[in-house]
Image (cartoon, rainbow, N blue to C red):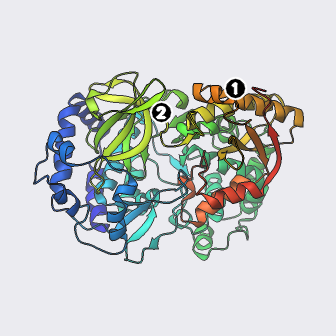
Amino acid sequence: MVEGGVKMKEIIEKFDLEKVIEEFESLTQDAENVQKETLKRILEGNASAEYLQSLGLNGRTDPESFKACVPLVTYKDLEPYINRIVDGDFSPILTGKPITDVSLSSGTSQGKQKYIPWNDELFETTVKIYQTSFVFRNKEFPIQNGKALSFIYSSKLSQTKGGVTAGTATTNVFRNPGFKHAMNAFKSDSVSPDEVIFSPDFHQSLYCHLLCGLFFREEVSLISSTFAHSLVYAFRTFEQVWEELVFDIREGVLSNRVTHPSIRTAMSKLLKPNPELANLIHKKCIGLSDWYGLIPELFPNVKYVLGIMTGSMEHYLKKLRHYAGEVPLLTSEYGASEGWIASNVNPKVAPEFATYVVLPQIAYFEFIPLKQLDGTKVELEPVGLTHVKIGEDYEIVLTNPAGLYRYRLGDAVKVIGFHKSAPEIKFLCRSNLMLTINIDKNTENDLQISVETSSKMLAEEKMEVIDYTSYIDLSNDPGHYVIFWEISGEASDAVLYECCTCLDKSFVDAGYVSSRKVKGIGALELRLVRKGTFQKILEHYVGLGVAVSQFKTPRCVAPTNTKVLQILLENVVENYFSSAYN
């Protein structure tokens, strides 16, 4: 990793805002040729890979030969090759150079973590996409010499039995020596010392992130995390621990909730008694009404709050806006554990309406049209990056430098327009996350809309849905949808029955509605879970090695995801059945 870090330092030190924009405009102007060159670079670099050789490419690098020889694949197809790498086979299996590191996917989508090959080329694409997003952000929201309150957490690294280092994608980025250089170049140095970021205990890390943010409150110019979920989680935690934080600042002594020696040592260098700051923070906190505008009150010079805020993260925007007050929320880049895809070059657009421009030089992209004929999903041939059509929906197919070739990402996107010749896309949902019993097909997005619509009744009672997920219950015939809610406050049975019926009616998929009317699908069930249930789910994933900043609440729990199901079922306190379609 060090060699890559040195190389990245050189790239980053040459970082020039105007040049990055010029390069972006040039690459998007000629996206088709850039894609051909990108594919050629990937295939030439990995020509000796056993996988490519077995498919008979014979050194050819043109898109036509590539598509004719190499099949579309999912993780399951590549798993036998990846397992060999993880078990210590360092021969050129998927790539020309040996893979010595893998990224662990969060595993929240399907309940099982995936090993994704990682190499220095992927780190380079990470810096490229960070650079592109940063320059467009900085045009609209200039940052001079501020610091970042970044709620980032490195998951624990593990060694596979074959000696390969495994960590989450974010951890692989954070631990690369080039990462600090990048953050410095983007004027995004973290207020927290490395020991806090790389702590093995995320509760202790979070407490110290908040404490460091308060020490440097005047210097904090942006607040960020990978996902909106961890930003909301951080400020919900602040509500619970703020008096303890104020005490630590007043006395100059770190709370005994922080036990890890390396964190205590690092924090002791920052801590000294500061009663004036403690009094100021105390006054600001008690002056807030229900914590509205907490962020600008604590951090007067913050320009924006940054994180991935689209897709399943949209649920957290209402709460995040409550904390942020007038401070803008900016959604960052679009990517997955398997690789980056696109940059947000219009940061002023609200996250709900955000689009991303696909960067043609970071991977080779194809798009499978998502069409339905007579209500049946039809599998069509993928089209190239520049051949997508505005208004159409597609599933993304990725070929990257780390051994994924024609890999179906499982993300559904809509093409909104073009920037020069590169498509501008909006993330829709995970196309393989589906609530379905027979002819019904409801996506993660449909579920989100249903929850948003029905939770308005709670909002009238000054309550909110803290988090939610779903499950298909086939234990009785007919099967039915189960929605799990964790809510703030105590709602009446009457309100929750109404919410439940509204949830049911808000699924407007034709197959669902017709099945409900003829009792082919049973009445939707809303199950209320104890406060802290979704915290237990988070901690379950953290125990598996998922970084908190990479955590996404699973929106549809598969029957194979037994541990998460167990947590949910053990914490149900009430349940309600819909009266729709009776």
- Which residue is more in the foreground, 249 or 276? 249
Residue of label 1: 517
Tell me residue 3's x, y (percent). 27, 66
Q: Quadrant of the N terminus?
A: bottom left
394 vs 486: above or below? above
Q: Distance between the residues labelled 1 and 2?
A: 52 Å
Query: In the rendering, which numbered label is found on residue 141?
Result: 2
Which residue is depicted at the point 27% across and 24% down? Answer: 420
Residue in front for this viewpoint, 73 or 197: 73
Disc 1 versus disc 2: nearer the observer: 1
Q: Is mark 1 on a helix, strand or loop?
A: helix
Q: Are marks 1 and 2 in contact (CB under 8 Å)?
A: no
36 left or right, relative to 478:
left
- Which amino acid, by three-letter code, is at mark 1? Lys
Q: Is residue 208 in sight in this rendering?
A: no
Query: Of marks 1 and 2, which one's residue comes earlier in the chain?
Result: 2
Residue 358, numbered circle? none
Q: How many labels does the image show?
A: 2
Residue closest to the eye, 59 or 119? 59
Front residue (pair 578, 335) = 578
Amino acid carrying mark 2 in the image: Phe
Left or right, residue 411 beside residue 442: left
Taking the spot 70% from the left edge, 59% from the top edge, the residue there is 566
Pinpoint residue 403: horizontal percent, then vertical percent. Answer: 28, 57
- The local crowd at label 1, few if under 14, some if 14 to 19, many if 20 or more residues have their Cα within 10 Å, is some
| Residue 516 placement: quadrant | top right
Q: Position of residue 100 (x, y in %)?
A: 32, 69
Residue at figure coordinates x 35%, y 60% from the top left: 118
